Image: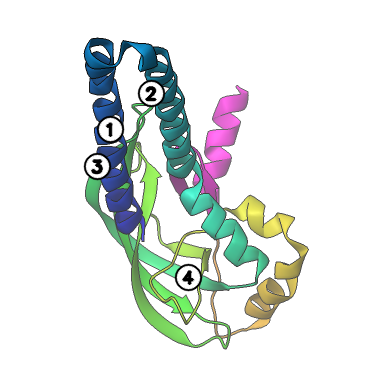
Amino acid sequence: MQVYIARVLNALLLLFSAVIVILFAGIFVASRFFPGYLRWHILVFAVTAVALTLFYRYLEENWDKRVILRMAREGKIGLMHINGGKRLMALRDTAFRHYWIYELEGELYNANHEKLAKTFQEKMNSATEDVPSGFVYVTYDEQKPAQIFIIPNAMIGGLPNLMPIVKGYEKNSAIPIRYLDAHYNRGMVLKTYREAMADYKKAQT
């Protein structure tokens, strides 16, 4: 899904850039042939350029987060055991922040606790190298099986409607849950809790 989002954003960036360039070129045309409309054309160019830039930045920052929050609120989640992953492609946003898109693989436990082999893409922090093995919660809808994103642990804890679902998984003795620390920091960060605690202690010294 993250690859799809990246491709759509790239297409939008090209489209918006073309619109802005055409409007900018129109300023010179207006100054020569329609001088009475020059101020209006400059105003339209400025407003359009700012609006398209802000809209693109909004999509860039929030598209995946809004999908994650909406699906989590609707209880459309699953438990994913990540076995590992590999880098697919590098990304850089309009703020020049770098990310890696990883292909992650493992087993997903759906609402009926059935185990399904799954691979999906996630936008990871640029410092990510090896992906640890462990459990995370992900968005999952059987009607949209490709729409899988890792849900940050803080979001899971902040949505009371998810607690019965989480407890249901944790009470299932057939699922050997060992959670990873999953949080968002310029891309998704996955660590074992031992690594997370070591980083926390290091930051306190």
Q: Quadrant of the C terminus?
A: top right
- Upstream in sequence: badge 3 or badge 1: 1
Q: How far across and how far down the image is residue 117, in percent?
A: 36, 80
Q: Amino acid at mark 4?
A: Met
Q: Depth-wise, is mark 3 or mark 1 nearer the camera?
A: 1
Residue at the spot of label 3: 90
* Residue 80: mark in rendering: 4
Q: Secondary structure at mark 2?
A: helix
Q: How far across and how far down the image is residue 157, in percent?
A: 70, 57
* Residue 17: mark in rendering: 1
Residue closer to the observer: 141 or 78: 141
- Upstream in sequence: badge 3 or badge 4: 4
Dot 3 crowding, Cα within 10 Å, few <14, some 14–19, many 20+: few
Q: Amino acid at mark 2?
A: Phe
Q: Which region of the structure is painted magenta?
A: 180-205
Q: Residue at x 27, y 41 (%)?
A: 15
Q: Is residue 21 left or right of residue 144?
A: left
Dot 1 crowding, Cα within 10 Å, few <14, some 14–19, many 20+: some
